[in-house]
């Protein structure tokens, strides 16, 4: 894994037909996970055969090709990225692009269950900020949501990350009748530790055998409820992502809202998603994809990969159209979030 990438020149940069420059790559390094969050996966998930997976060296080569084409931010996700065997060798190898200045940020999204083991090494590899998904602080609810999870392990993982000097942002999916009442407490807990909290609307991805309408709560409703209790000041800043942030005056902390359903944010989308089998999805909420595994394996020359990436970027759609209501019984896309990488 020692390919190098020189910074992209303007002519190499990836710009889609709507004038959006692609500078953010999210990579699902495995579709496997040690949890079974009910809104994400069915309990008896069938995972990809191991033989279909790209090797870590192949993932590195693809990531490096994207970095050479102007990707500045790279997020490892999954499935659970920290359950992929030897994943730290990929993180370490990718960190050379931080050292060279080609990559601005290397980060990951994790459920936190394995963080206690990996936090220091992540920091050592140049990771500075991570997102940890945590929907509740109630052990019984945590078990109900994740089916298999142990809240204490996640909390210990978060503490390990903080002690290692990583900035942690908590992501929570808002779930009707499950954690919606707990959001103020979750926020106060996160802000009390200096962590931002981002709330996410549940998205209709994957046929997971549960009615989405029973899970979905619009964040506009939760925001209105929070505003009765707290002073929320809109922040102009964006992180380049879909979240809109407010400062909560009483806690001094930041609260984000990701609203793919109640307010679509595609006009500023700067990202594409790579799966562990080498499929590139140009939009989280659309089915179109490009196979990068074939060009990757066809030639040792990265020009073949570059051409496949260029062709794919020209197919990036304008946006997604997620809908959850009683008339839409089918998911917007058949694949689960764990495959594309949430
Ligand atoms: N295992 C890692 C984690 O838990 O953060 C990374 C992958 S997980 C698929 C990424 C995020 O997607 C998590 O925050 C999870 O809660 C969220 N997620 C999964 N399915 C979702 C859905 N249908 N709608 C909204 N968010 C979802």
Image: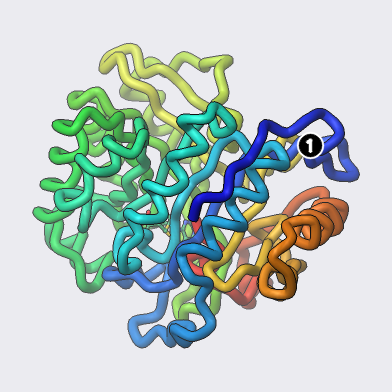
Q: Is residue 35 above or below residue 157?
A: below
The picture places residue 73, in percent across and down from the top left corner, at 55, 37
Q: Is mark 1 within 8 Å of ligand 1?
A: no
Judging depth in this view, the residue of 272 and 122 nearest the camera is 122
The picture places residue 70, in percent across and down from the top left corner, at 69, 37
Q: Dividing the image into four quarters, tell me where ligand 1 lies.
A: bottom left
Q: Quadrant of residue 300?
A: bottom right
Residue in view at x 25 percent, y 52 percent: 112
Residue in view at x 67 percent, y 60 percent: 285
Q: Is residue 239 above or below residue 286?
A: above
Q: Quadrant of residue 121?
A: top left
Judging depth in this view, the residue of 20 and 295 nearest the camera is 295
Judging depth in this view, the residue of 289 and 98 nearest the camera is 98
Examine the rendering and report whether any part of residue 134 can be seen. yes
**Residue placed under numbered mark 1 in the picture:** 13
The picture places residue 120, in percent across and down from the top left corner, at 20, 40
What is the basis of the colouring in this image? rainbow
228 vs 341, left or right, is left
| Element marked by disc 1 | loop
Q: Is residue 183 above or below residue 326?
A: above
Judging depth in this view, the residue of 226 and 75 nearest the camera is 75
Examine the rendering and report whether any part of residue 265 can be seen. no
User: How many numbered marks, from 0 up?
Assistant: 1
């Amino acid at each position: 894994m020692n390919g190098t990438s020189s910074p992209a020149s303007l002519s190499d940069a990836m710009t889609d037909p709507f004038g959006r420059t692609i500078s953010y790559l999210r990579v699902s390094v495995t579709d496997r996970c040690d949890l079974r969050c009910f809104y994400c996966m069915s309990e008896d998930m069938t995972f990809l055969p191991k033989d279909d997976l790209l090797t870590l060296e192949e993932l590195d080569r693809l990531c490096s090709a994207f970095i050479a084409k102007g990707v500045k931010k790279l997020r490892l996700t999954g499935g659970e990225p920290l359950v992929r065997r030897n994943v730290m060798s990929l993180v370490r190898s990718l960190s050379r692009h931080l050292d060279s200045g080609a990559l601005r940020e290397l980060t990951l999204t994790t459920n936190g269950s394995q963080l206690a083991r990996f936090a220091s090494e992540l920091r050592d590899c140049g990771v500075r900020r991570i997102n940890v998904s945590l929907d509740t602080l109630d052990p019984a609810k945590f078990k109900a949501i994740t089916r298999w999870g142990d809240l204490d392990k996640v909390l210990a993982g978060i503490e390990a990350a903080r002690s290692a000097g990583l900035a942690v942002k908590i992501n929570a999916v808002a779930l009707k009748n499950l954690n919606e009442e707990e959001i103020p407490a979750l926020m106060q807990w996160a802000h009390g530790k200096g962590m931002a909290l981002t709330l996410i609307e549940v998205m209709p991805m994957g046929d997971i055998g549960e009615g989405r309408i029973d899970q979905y709560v619009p964040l506009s409703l939760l925001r209105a409820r929070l505003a009765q209790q707290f002073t929320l000041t809109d922040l102009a800043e964006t992180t380049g992502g879909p979240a809109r942030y407010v400062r909560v005056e009483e806690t001094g902390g930041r609260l984000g809202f990701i609203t793919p359903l109640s307010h679509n944010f595609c006009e500023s989308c700067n990202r594409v998603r790579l799966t562990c089998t080498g499929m590139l999805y140009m939009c989280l909420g659309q089915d179109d994809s490009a196979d990068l595994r074939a060009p990757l394996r066809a030639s040792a020359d990265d020009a073949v990969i570059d051409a496949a990436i260029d062709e794919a970027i020209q197919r990036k759609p304008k946006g997604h159209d997620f809908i959850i209501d009683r008339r839409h019984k089918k998911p917007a896309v058949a694949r689960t979030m764990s495959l594309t990488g949430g």
